[in-house]
Image (tube, grey):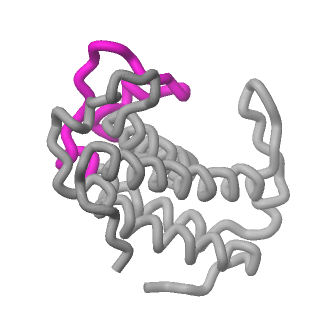
Amino acid sequence: MEKKTASTRMQGILDLFDMQTTFFAKAIEGISEADMHNRLNTQANHMAWLTGSLVQQRLSMTKETSPGLTQAGEELFANNKGIQEDVKYPENSEYLQDWEKISPAARQAIVDIDDEKLDSEIDMGFMKMSYYDLITFTIYREASIIGQLALWRRLLGYPALKYD
């Protein structure tokens, strides 16, 4: 697998991306569909929403380079839509299929992006930021969501996330 990036600033980002790519499947492994929707009588986002949000976020990394990619729950997460009550979110198998489909394109986008593009500004409608800032935030948020999924595993009585 290619480890050299067009911009040296992206090398560490690529390493984190690769780790998180493998952690994702482990974070939802063995979780029942009922538990994926269990909020434990709180207002917290359940695992099904967290998982779909993570897939959608990674999908957004591919919008310019692979515009045709979508996920099974696209309409549930479009435009940063929050959790919806009484909605059945996609099953783990669908999320995993989408993750495996989207991740190579997102990885290639990280490998190929150059300093000029990283320094350019993206207008997100509600704010502007550089592509570099957007990508670093995206990678940070991936780690945060995987951490939340790992915590949910324990709260719901499942074995801890294995990082091996």
Q: How many marks?
A: 0
Query: In percent of the image, x 41 and y 46: which residue is there?
Result: 55
The N terminus: image quadrant: bottom left
Can you say whether 81 is above or below 93 in the image? above
Q: Is residue 77 left or right of residue 98?
A: right
Query: In percent of the image, x 59 and y 50: which residue is there?
Result: 141
Q: Position of residue 126 (x, y in %)?
A: 76, 25
- Viewer-proximal residue among 20 and 1: 20
Q: Is residue 135 left or right of residue 147?
A: right
Q: Position of residue 53 (x, y in %)?
A: 44, 38
Q: Which residues are magenta?
A: 70-97
Can you say whether 49 is above or below 106 in the image? above
The C terminus: image quadrant: bottom left
Most extreme residue toward the top is 86
- Viewer-proximal residue among 3 and 46: 46
- Viewer-proximal residue among 27 and 1: 27
- Is residue 80 a member of the stretch shown in magenta? yes
Q: Quadrant of residue 104?
A: bottom left
Q: Position of residue 30 (x, y in %)?
A: 17, 54
Q: Is residue 43 left or right of residue 64?
A: left
